[in-house]
Amino acid sequence: MASTTLASPTLKFLEDRWDPAIAAGLDEPELLRYRSNLLGSDLRITNFAGGNTSSKVNDIDPLTGETVKVLWVKGSGGDLGSIKRGGFATLYQEKLLALEKLYRGPATEDAMVEMYALCAFRNNPVAASIDTPLHGFLPFPHVDHLHPDWGIALAASANGLAKMEEFNRQYHHRLVWVPWQRPGFELAMMMKRAVEENPGCDGIVLGGHGLFTWGDTQRECYLNTLTVIDQIGQFIAAHGEKKGSTRFGGVAVKARPNRRELAIEILPFLRGRVSGQRRWIANYSDADDVLQFVNSAHAKDLAFLGTSCPDHFIRTKIRPMFVPWSEGQDIEALKKQIDASLTEYREQYRSYYQKHALPDSPALRDNNPSIVLIPGLGMISFGKNKTEARISSEFYTNAIHVMEGASLLHDSGTSADTKAAVPQCASGMDPASFKVYTNYVALPLSEAFRIEYWALEEAKIRRQPAEKELSRYIVVVVGGGSGIGREVALLAAARGAHVMIADREGSAAASVAGELAKVTSKEFVASTAVDIRSREAIREAIKATVASFGGADILINTAAMFPSSPDGVITEAQWAATLDVNVTANYLLADEFAKPFSAQGLDASIVLTSSANAVVPKRGSEAYDVSKAALSHLVRELAIGLSPKVRVNGISPATVVKGSTMFPRDRVRASLAKYGIAFEESMNDDELRNLLAGFYAQRTLTHQPIDPADCAEAILFLASPRSRCTTGHLIPVDGGLAEAFLR
């Protein structure tokens, strides 16, 4: 079969990122990995985890010692941008082709997937994707299957076949059209026939789906792919220039100038409403292309049609939720619209499931939307974590581009809503099931269901790692820049939480955030400076948390102050400051966080840090001791006041010296001298602190120094669902301090 060979394509939009110096030292599998990474590095070429690449490579059969052809193809669930050599499935090409003899038609094609494992080369455990036969049955050494926005726009146009032929004439290509078919063995057979019937073709447009391109070498395949995608982009752009600047029927609602502030205000309410079955993390976008769409006259109708490409709606669901919100309406009106839209959306989704489900279909999943479109505001997307929420947003942005491209390809003077069969409609399908609006063709709901609730997709979901204890929870750690707070943040992150680190010292909070990013994901952590004595500063910290993750579930405060002076005399100002920080600030924190907690309507928890000093009076620490006694009772008062949705608890540690900002070098030296503990001035801060911590430990029943990690364990126990029936309680973390026993 012939294929186009290009040495130096002229690209208008995309960039040729191939480095000959890098490629020169790579074998064929590594060149495939390199090619894949380059293609996946540009979201205009393919979306996250979307598309497939393959190469047919000669290798030695370990059983016979003979040279055999091996198909290397992206494994199930992999991402082209980050895939490594080990992420590819490898199959005996000859065995894969032999499966055609076993194939008995579309009704049995799912059973063919089980056969791919029997074709594995060298017992490679990487699961072969459902797209494997699409690559194997194409007679080309190197194949790319991608979902570029421009390519899908052509594939999802009511006049897509005619426009593809026009494109071929204009850019001297020989693309062929294959109507819609769910990915799998049947589609592989359709593509095989299309290539056989069109010798010399240089690509395939899959109706409503995506694009296939190929080449005789890795480099040629990469160039062919870039060239076809870029030229389709040029083709659509030229149509757009003829139509002027108006998109999607023009502006119906103006973007609100304060939309980011409004989004932060509505996010906790919206997150709570969509998290009735399980919690979600949010992502907000007011990108120009998003606003152009959601504010347009056609947005509601196009959004209702849903997406076309399978890769899109698997993450964005069959359709987004469009919330009508007119100019001049306030937030309270928006809340009412959200509730009404959610009721309608859930009913429609349940009806969609009931209409298309079969006896062996997976159970109904969460019927809340993952994409919410609000005119004047933008798009809010939800996912099990921040990364998933962002990716869902990117996918729907891709869908917006597809709808825009399809509408631009509509020829003036012809009906955009023709009732004639569209080219996506294959033989035997109902033409009426393909809905068209402004030339954009959406996937039939029955076909969407066959993919969304496909047993193979369900298996892919089940292969994902189990979620951690605090996955989907948003934890705010005040005082997280050092000591106990730092340990709490690290432990919460390790248990899957999204963590906002708040501290008086913004640089300290940012530093700990950097630590957390190394053990979790940088998208799962954020930091902010906060002065907890100020309501306004607390409100800004809450806004920063909502902007990052969509809400808050757990508030933890470890920040406190211990007044000291060289002569041991505490001034009235120090007394007032101690009560301000250790008591009043905790009240302000709880009072302000109660607002987003209430808006969400989800179970939430607060954990405050008291002290054994609350019940053990001492000479010289009256201000601190009294403040902690008040804080302990504040825990009980807040538990009553914020019930039943918010649990409030606390811990009462004995003196924690390690990592504490309340123990600067001078205070440690003074304490060592007070207790007659010998030390050398040459000792560093940690050595001095260890001496003091060891002394305090001997006064406990366990003789163990209290470590910040010990406190973190207790705090997160109280904060987590494991203690769902505990509120108004304080756990001692004091090593067994007899003086602090309840009395």
Image (spheres, rainbow, N blue to C red):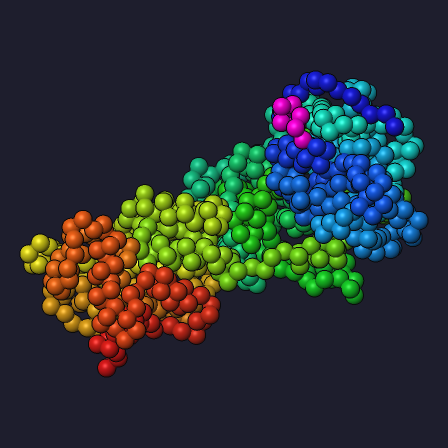
Marker count (numbered):
0
- Image coords of residue 310 (percent x, y): 72, 45
- Image coords of residue 650 (percent x, y): 33, 68
Say if 30 sits above or below 328 in the image: above
- Image coords of residue 42 (percent x, y): 61, 32
Q: Residue at x 65, y 20 (%)?
A: 12
Residue 188 visible in rendering: no
Say if 67 sits above or below 230 in the image: below
Foreground residue among 186 and 485: 485
Foreground residue among 64 and 237: 64
Residue 691 visible in rendering: yes
Q: Quick one: quadrant of the N terminus? A: top right
Foreground residue among 616 and 523: 616
Q: Residue at x 22, y 67 (%)?
A: 696
Q: Residue at x 16, y 72 (%)?
A: 617
Find out whether residue 57 is within the magenta segment: no
Location of residue 86 by image quarter: top right
* Residue range of the region highlighted in magenta in the rendering: 19-26
Left or right placement of residue 377 versus residue 297 in this view: left
